[in-house]
Image: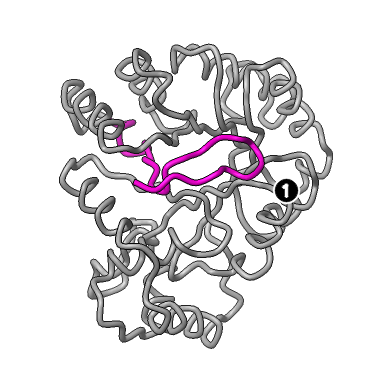
């Protein structure tokens, strides 16, 4: 496993992180979740990403990994869903942090992101300042923003955040040339979500209800002819795109997790394949905005 400096934070995170969205439902037993989460850490992953909207995910991470708290970094996302409190308010941030601390059974959170917060809200400054106060109080180590497009650009340039989380994959490259480079220049860590673009190559016809319809249409438009397995190409593309610190992959299958780590460990894509992917996106780009 490769480990990288997360911006100027002084923290080093695994290039492959674990996206814990899929462990939030009841499709697996508690014992299976316990085995999976401990295997994540045993594999060398030290970054686990969740959110307050991911069902039972946060509680399960706390339940099964709190005894190994010093072995991994918690990345979570807040800003909404607090009973009796308006979304995207100072109270939503403060209480969101407090609730997360209890769910994870910990005294600090490592990376806390404003979860797809609208740019209009960011511009008012209230929620960013509230998250900053959580950092000052020692409850949060790194204040971050999770999102795309104009809001992401603002977050990177604002000086109010030390990290961001955004979609980076073969079919979502809009922010690579400018925003990711600015993030690196400004000392921000970057967590790349959806590194496989939700695997649109699984479908022969346009899918519905799989949250990859847009990526499927882009894949067809790009018509890439690369002599490599799609999963491998996608993971290596995202993990070794400039500015990316870590990619988060979600699975409930131990074998798939190990395979993903092995694929990423092969390093950068050959230059001809990487350049073909980049050039095809640019040539076919029809105002393809980042997917939230």
Q: Is residue 166 left or right of residue 123?
A: left
Number of on-image labels:
1
Based on the displayed image, in which of its 4 quarters is residue 68 positioned? top left
**Magenta stretch in the rendered image:** 1-25
237 or 83: nearer the viewer: 237
In the image, taking residue 258 as reference, residue 63 lies left or right, namely right
Q: Quadrant of the C terminus?
A: bottom right
Residue indicated by mark 1: 155
Judge whether residue 9 is colored magenta: yes
Residue under the point 33% across and 31% down = 24
Q: Position of residue 286 (x, y in %)?
A: 57, 81
Location of residue 224 by image quarter:
bottom left
Residue 261, position as x, y percentages in the image: 28, 50
Residue in view at x 39 percent, y 28 percent = 55
| Residue drawn at point x = 56 percent, y = 47 percent | 165
Q: Is residue 122 above or below residue 57?
A: below
Q: Is residue 48 left or right of residue 287?
A: left
**Which element carries disc 1, helix, strand or loop?**
helix
Quarter of the image holding residue 200?
A: bottom left
Residue 122 lies, in percent from the top left, at 76, 42
Compared across the picture, whether 14 is left or right of 254 comes to right
From this view, report whether residue 35 is shown above or below residue 7: above
Residue 270 to residue 6: above or below: below
């Amino acid at each position: 496993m490769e480990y990288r400096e997360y911006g100027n934070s002084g923290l080093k995170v695994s290039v492959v992180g674990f996206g814990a969205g899929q462990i939030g439902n009841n499709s697996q037993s508690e014992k299976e979740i316990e085995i999976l989460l401990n295997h994540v850490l045993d594999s060398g992953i030290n970054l686990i990403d969740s959110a307050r909207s991911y069902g039972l995910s946060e509680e399960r991470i706390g339940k099964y990994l709190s005894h190994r708290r010093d072995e991994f970094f918690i990345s979570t996302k807040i800003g909404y869903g607090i009973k009796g409190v308006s979304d995207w308010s100072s109270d939503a941030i403060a209480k969101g942090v407090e609730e997360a601390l209890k769910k994870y059974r910990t005294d600090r959170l490592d990376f806390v992101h404003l979860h797809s917060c609208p740019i209009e809200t960011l511009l008012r400054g209230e929620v960013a300042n509230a998250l900053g106060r959580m950092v000052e109080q020692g409850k949060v180590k790194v204040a971050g923003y999770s999102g795309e497009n104009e809001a992401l650009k603002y977050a990177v340039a604002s000086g109010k955040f030390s990290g961001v989380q955004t979609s980076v994959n073969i079919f979502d490259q809009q922010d690579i040339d400018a925003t990711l480079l600015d993030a690196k220049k400004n000392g921000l860590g970057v967590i790349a979500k959806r590194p496989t673009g939700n695997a649109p190559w699984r479908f022969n016809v346009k899918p519905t209800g799989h949250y990859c319809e847009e990526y499927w249409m882009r894949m067809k438009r790009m018509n890439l002819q690369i002599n490599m397995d799609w999963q491998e190409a996608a993971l290596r593309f995202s993990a070794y795109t400039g500015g990316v610190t870590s990619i988060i992959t979600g699975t409930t299958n131990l074998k798939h997790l190990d395979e993903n780590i092995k694929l990423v460990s092969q390093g950068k894509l050959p230059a001809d394949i990487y350049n073909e992917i980049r050039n095809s996106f640019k040539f076919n780009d029809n105002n393809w905005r980042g997917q939230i």
